[in-house]
Image (cartoon, rainbow, N blue to C red):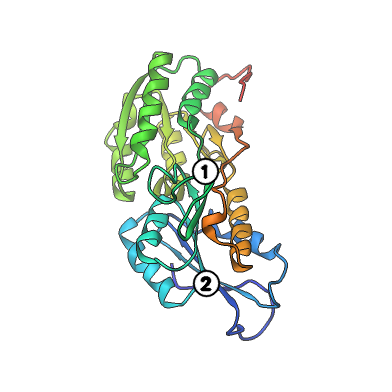
Amino acid sequence: MSADQYHISGQVGAVDPNAWKVGVLCSGSEALFLPPFQEGIHMLDPIEGRDFVIEARAADGVYDRLPGLVAELIALNVDVIVTAGVPAALAAQRAATTIPIVAANVGDPVGIGLVSTLARPGGYITALSHCAADLSAKQVELFKQTIPTLARLVVLYNPMNPLHPGYWQETQAAAQALGLLLVRLEVRDTNELVHAFDAGGLERGDGLLVLSDALFNAQAARIAQLATAHRLPMMAQYREFVEAGGLLAYGPNLPQIAKRAADYVDRILRGANPADLPVEQPTEFELVLNIKTARELGLTITTWKVMV
């Protein structure tokens, strides 16, 4: 994206040179994260009468761009960096060794080395997680409950995502318990995404599970369209996939996490140390079904009694 500048205060005229500068670095598209984050910033009380300026950069799923994008934010002397997604968080951690970082939409921040512990992150980074330990397993379980005939499940997997090996293990265990066969479809970029669908990878299954990933999130509409074109029911983690035409989603609400990230920014700019801000984990999960897609796929879902 272009180096757009967002003047949050809504005032007309030149931006105050003393305004707080908030850098936003997105692993995928800014469209899922930036609007609700801006909404969260709007809701904050003024800090010392100073404006906020948001400097946003998005890699759009091309993770090789992240080092250069975070370097741009550092050169702008931002006061805090907010990241969306694991790749952006790790890129910021490597480069911005003195700037406070709020890492949003990350899974297992301890396991990937972002923070020391959930209760006491340590260092200059705190985080807002998007994942619970058994979320992938629960998605498989709910998918099978919704479509009892489900037998072979294609799993959209990004080898570049450091969390996906763990997600894959959870998915394997859940599938084995339910008697499902898994087919792993590896996709690293948008070109591989289209090729994987066109090459017949989906024909090996009767359901598609999309693991959480910034690239996949940015391509939610395309993935949903391709899955429907192949008449394949799809389960993902976020409602945005269902809104784009996918069948099912089970997971936390991304806009709410983005709004909460604004609160963490506020606390840091008021003097809080990121090391003392506990990592926030999701406590509410939403289960969403697209009835229109179910009808288009010829699925008869007469009862949807699932315990979440």
Identify which amino acid the numbered label 2 is placed on: Asp
The kind of secondary structure element at disc 2 is: loop
Q: Which quarter of the rendering shows the C terminus?
A: top right
Image-quadrant location for residue 67: bottom left
Q: Position of residue 104 (x, y in %)?
A: 51, 52
Image-quadrant location for residue 156: top left
Which residue is pictured at 34% across the width and 45% down the height? 161
Which residue is pictured at 52% across the width and 43% down the height? 130
Q: CA distance from mark 1 to mark 2?
A: 24 Å
Label 2 Cα crowd, 10 Å radius (few <14 / some 14-19 / many 20+): some
The residue pinned by badge 2 equals: 79
The kind of secondary structure element at disc 1 is: loop
How many numbered discs, if any?
2
Left or right: where 126 falls relative to 209: right
Identify which amino acid the numbered label 1 is placed on: His
In this rendered view, identify the residue nearer to me: 244 or 185.
185
Which residue is pictured at 51% across the width and 41% down the height? 241
Residue 9 showing in the rendered view: yes
**Eye-nearest disc, 1 or 2:** 2
Q: Position of residue 253 (x, y in %)?
A: 59, 43
In this rendered view, identify the residue nearer to me: 71 or 13.
71
Q: Position of residue 64 (x, y in %)?
A: 30, 59
Q: Between disc 1 and disc 2, whose residue precedes?
A: 2
In this rendered view, identify the residue nearer to me: 127 or 219.
127
Residue 31 showing in the rendered view: no
Left or right: where 205 falls relative to 217: left
The residue pinned by badge 1 equals: 130
Label 1 Cα crowd, 10 Å radius (few <14 / some 14-19 / many 20+): many
